[in-house]
Amino acid sequence: MSAIEKVEVLVTGAGRNFVTLRITTSDGVQGLGDATLNGRELSVASYLRDHIAPLLKGRDSTRIEDTWQYLYKGAYWRRGPVTMTAIAAVDMALWDIKGKVVGLPVYQLLGGKSRDKVLVYGHASGSDLPSLIDDMTEFRERGYQAIRAQMAVPGMGGTYGVRKGAIYEPAAADLPDEQLWSTEMYLKFAPDYLGKVREEFGFDFHLLHDVHHRLTPIEAARFGKDVEPMRLFWMEDPTPAENQETFRLIREHTTTPIAVGEVLNSIWDVQHLITNQLIDYVRTSVTHAGGITHLRRIFDLAALYQVRSGSHGPTDLSPVSLAAAVSLDIAIPNFGIQEHMVFAPETQEVFRGYPQFAAGYVTPSEAPGLGVEYDDAAAAKFPYDPKYLPVARRADGSLHDW
Ligand code: GCO
Ligand code: MG
């Protein structure tokens, strides 16, 4: 038996804040797991350090499923982003260790390749139409075959998904940024600029758009109908997903494909959406939805209903998360697309060996395990600095979903 000997929770602010779990076995094999929950990082660090690490010491590192069940059922309290992120980190680290022990990349342990490469989408954005078009041009030139387009709505200042310079969705120290939201203005401008993007670049690439939970079901239905001529690959998070049944109304009105899941954490959170075929893509992330073991279960359920994967993968998840997601993407039969962004230089300094982009696709590392290494000395240069995501308010001052 190769027992778990050491459990370390590593926190760094390398480009963004990241929490990484490192497990070392009695044979000296190390595994990494991503435990980053943007804006609430230290809650997961504490969950791991104070409540999970003592349970792991001495356990058989090869028993991945049993450890998952032990941590899930053993907590008594179920689900939720903090718990599921903590369990995910342990799960990824144990898959990483198993791969290293047998000398195979993790995707081989998941059944091997179902495809040669993993289609990814990049994020183009702009504060106005000319800058969005410029950014789209750049993504096209870099070889992206799928691009998400987001533009600031005039008069609304900054909004989600629009980069400020090189920084994506900058989180704020002290208090969250307050951003204005107007559904009326968004519904007026967004279909229009998505149409202009198609006019400019045509239809020989996939165009995606993130609504970021901002609309009511009937507004989302209207939006979906309005953008049908643009043939989106998907509209993402058209309405908040806590009430899964609410998607039926959107579904009944539009053929625009629907993607949901980045804020959801378990198979039960997406069960109704999937089994009623209310969505086309499930976007739960390997970090926030219980790791490789649990995300595989979600994708297998989805496959029965012709729902495909579309894993969440912004740069507020670490390169370990990307490596784990791509291990699944390459192996599962019902892969759809993978979100992809270029990590900040500081992040690249700390994490090495993660999947790299080439001509529209990424491929998993052939190194044993997940293939990612963590540089402690580099991480120490970037201390953790607490930050918050913004909040959104309507003109009357009331809070809207961000
Ligand atoms: C996406 C997301 C993210 C989230 C972010 C919050 O589609 O990539 O919407 O950008 O806003 O992950 O931390
Ligand atoms: Mg999103």
Image (cartoon, grey):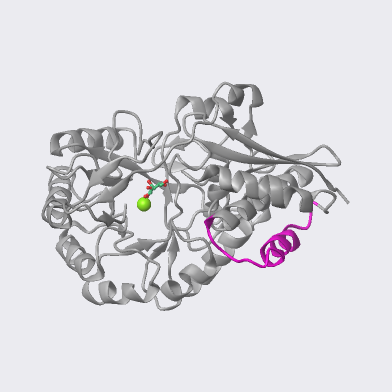
Name the residue rendered at 18%, 60% in the picture.
227
Residue 240 location (% of width, % of height): 34, 63
Q: Position of residue 303 (x, y in %)?
A: 49, 69
Quadrant of the image occupied by residue 281: bottom left
Residue name at image x 73 percent, y 63 percent = 70
Q: Nearer the viewer, residue 156 or 174?
A: 174
User: Which region shows up in magenta?
Assistant: 61-81
* Image-quadrant location for residue 273: bottom left
| Residue 351 pos. (x, y %) | 58, 31
Residue 269 visible (yes or no): yes
Query: Residue 21, position in %: x, y?
Result: 66, 42
The answer to if 338 sits in the magenta stretch is: no
Q: Horizontally, is 300 left or right of 366 in the view? A: left
Q: In the shown orientation, is residue 222 left or right of residue 247?
A: left
Question: Is the residue 279 above or below the residue 356 in the image?
Answer: below
Above-or-below relation of 354 to 327: above
Task: Give the residue at x 36% y 61%.
Answer: 259
Residue 34 visible within the image: no
What residue sits 57% from the left and 28% below the top?
350
In the displayed structure image, the side of residue 268 where residue 55 appears, left or right = right
> Would residue 143 appear left or right of 269 to someone viewing this image?
left
